[in-house]
Amino acid sequence: MEAVIEVRGLVKDFGSTRALDGLDLSVEPGQVHGFLGPNGSGKSTTIRVLLGLIKASGGEARLFGEDPWRRAVELHRRLAYVPGDVNLWPNLTGGETIDMLGSLRGGLDPKRREELVERFELDLTKKASTYSKGNRQKVALVAALATDAELFIFDEPTSGLDPLKEAVFQECVKEITGEGHTILLSSHILGQVEHLADTLTIIRSGKTVESGSIEELRKMTHESADPDRPASLEELFLSVYEPK
Amino acid sequence: MSRFTGTGEALRFALKRDRLLLPLCVVGLIGWVGLYVASYSGLYGTQADLNSLYKSVAGNPALVAMVGPTDGLRTLGGATAWETLPVVSVISAIFAMFVVIRHTRAEEEDGRSELLLAAGSGRLATLTAAMIVTAGSLTLAAIGWLVVFLATGYEAGSSVLLVLSILGFGYVFVGTTAICCQVTAKARTARGLVGIVIGIAWFLRALGDTGPEALTWLSPLGWAQSTKAYWDDTWWPLILPVAATATTVGFALWLLSRRDIGSGLIQPRPGPDRAHPSLLHPLGFSLRVQRGSIIGWTYLLFVYGFAIGAVGDNITGILESSDALTAAFAGTSSNIVDSYFATIFTVLALMATGFTIGGVLRPHSEETHDRAALLLAGPLGKVRWAWGHVLIAYAASALMMALLGLGLALGLGVVTGDFGETGRLVASGFAQAPAMWLTASLAVLLFGISSRASVAAWGLLVAFVVIWSVASFGDLPSWIVDLSPYSHVPAVPAVPLEAGPLVTMTAIAAAVTTIGLALWRRRDLL
Ligand SMILES: Nc1ncnc2c1ncn2[C@@H]1O[C@H](COP(=O)(O)OP(=O)(O)O)[C@@H](O)[C@H]1O
Ligand SMILES: [Mg+2]
């Protein structure tokens, strides 16, 4: 089957800073794919290229086999996105925002919307200007999770949520994976990704360090005879945080 | 820990952040006054020139209402003060408004103030630093003006008085802006509030100078003009801005020490838990985003038009009693009220272009506030989305200028009982729109080039204001005058409405907008 996300040798320069330096990422249909890396390693930049919001400087990025920069509108019908830092329109209430964002994708399932609002304990009548970071994130999460997208892209979606709501988020992701959706989950926390993901890409400084299924990566690290190789997934993950 | 702890750091931070912007603005303010002064000393070099200026202008109630009392026009200094003081004062106030809000409410709205407070900075530090930076910049500009006046040979004492009068007005608006920043949680609304206060100050003075004098004393602009620099130097009114500045600054600090961070005194009320159907269409949503400023500006222009229209008839009465004035204006227009209205239309078109630029740059503000990605990650084309905002801004601009004309006609009609001018005045208002579109289309072009370039659009508007203000009183090479779109709008209703330049400007605006949005299609989202 065709990969949902296929990124090869992706390069992105912002002026003289190289944010992505030959990054590879591949996500198959139905997978929950963890996208791990320290702050500033290029996760958000990769996602913004995949969303067609910024143009790649080099390499290749394909979403459902197509170019996200040229075919943004068509591709966006098939996906839902939650950024890490959600900023909303201060004058709109949470409820208005959810409906407006949902309407872009042809409307939300009202029952699903209601259920999610209850689970995340979100007060829909408050103006966005009075929401905390966590509540703004919940608004974006509800708007995304109440759609029937083929692909969900979450960019550090729980950085403002308390542990209880984070658990709710994890439940929601588990539920939709059963239904055959594909999920790209970027995070800088190994625990969260380990819990949800089938496959994993670890990046550092805009380059892919390791990629594979969680099982494979575990086995590979444990069985490695090379004393310089990390001996566990944790060590592998921690090793990308160390200065080169 | 004192509530002022960290003011020094905040000050350094603000200066570092604006190390380019502030010097540029200060130099601009000084250069602008320099331009004025240079053009006057050429234009009114001899006493005969001044006498003829005095004869043509003195007591003209339209000009008294627009600019101020004309008694001092017999001297070069008096003429300079008459023409520069109101406009330089208002621009200084607008400068104060932008700088104070930029460093306080805007920062707080974007959630950056909390970081500073958490880092041990005192509650009042940021506001105090912002006010010091702003007042300091104004003071530097004032010193520059003084140097310009002295270097040109103006009388020293009077020059100091004039400069202090303008500076006092600017200071009052440092404090006023600080108060407005406490009242509302949104930078945009705070700017709107300050704009209204500036408008009221101008209007009270205009009414006071043409009617009950007491009203002049309610306006900080009236205080500034009552120093009568160069013809009847009066120093004591300087006390008024000093007292008002102290009061407003103190009140703002008191308000800040009592309110919650991140919120204003006016708390947002809860709203509906689901969206009105009109929000469920991208264009409906864009309209909602712009709704507040559309309503605010339209209302303001209409009420303003009504008030000016009502005074308009009064002006005819005074004019008809003076043969000299009727003769002076006979060459330019059959009806002196019409030329007065023509000037009003131009001034307000320049002002309302502030709305138009703000409207077409909504996509830019959505981009910098990191909200655009949330929309554009949906199946909404970035060009279609931006066109929506631009068209809303263009349509609303035309509508509000037409309503300004309607307001004028109704104000005039209520006093005279004759509503026959309505169609002509509405059309005159509408005729201002192409110049506003053209200016705003340049903003779209800049936005298409890059996000950072967008703000230069405001500089463009300031340049057009300067061209208009210098050209209407002084002497500018015609190629410079022609650079401004507003110079190409027929001076309706004083002259017949001529469609040619309007059609041309509309066509250019459409082309430039299209190019701008094509560039936007090709560039990265911030
Ligand atoms: N618009 C931009 N302009 C300049 N540099 C940027 C921009 N966006 C991201 N960067 C830089 O690119 C690198 C990767 O950032 P990002 O993708 O946000 O990392 P992550 O999401 O993994 O924390 C960082 O060094 C960041 O500073
Ligand atoms: Mg990120």
Image (tube, rainbow, N blue to C red):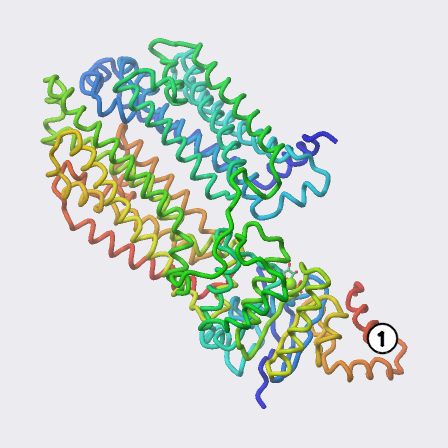
Residue appearing at x 60%, y 78% in the figure: A7
Query: Label 1 CB, ligand 1: below 8 Å?
Result: no
Instruction: Kindly state the secondary structure of the residue where label 1 is placed.
Output: loop
Q: Nearer the viewer, residue B296 or B350?
A: B296
Question: Which image quarter: residue A165?
Answer: bottom right
Mark 1 surroundings: few (<14), some (14-19) or many (≥20) residues within 10 A = some
Disc 1 residue type (three-letter): Pro
Q: Residue B498 appears at what percent x and percent y?
A: 14, 46
Q: Residue B138 appears at what percent x and percent y?
A: 50, 28
Q: Is residue A52 visible?
A: yes
Q: Nearer the viewer, residue B326 or B501?
A: B326
Residue under circle 1? A230
Q: Is residue A57 visible?
A: no
Q: Residue A58 appears at what percent x and percent y?
A: 57, 73
In the image, is residue B452 above or below residue B102?
below
Name the chain letter of the residue that bears numbered label 1: A
Where the C terminus of chain A falls, by quadrant? bottom right
Residue appearing at x 27%, y 17% in the figure: B70
Question: Which image quarter: residue B127?
Answer: top right
In the image, is residue B11 above or below residue B356?
above
Residue appearing at x 32%, y 41% in the figure: B299
Given the current orientation, which residue lies at the most extreme bottom position?
A: A1
Query: Relative to residue A59, is residue B301 drawn left or right?
Result: left
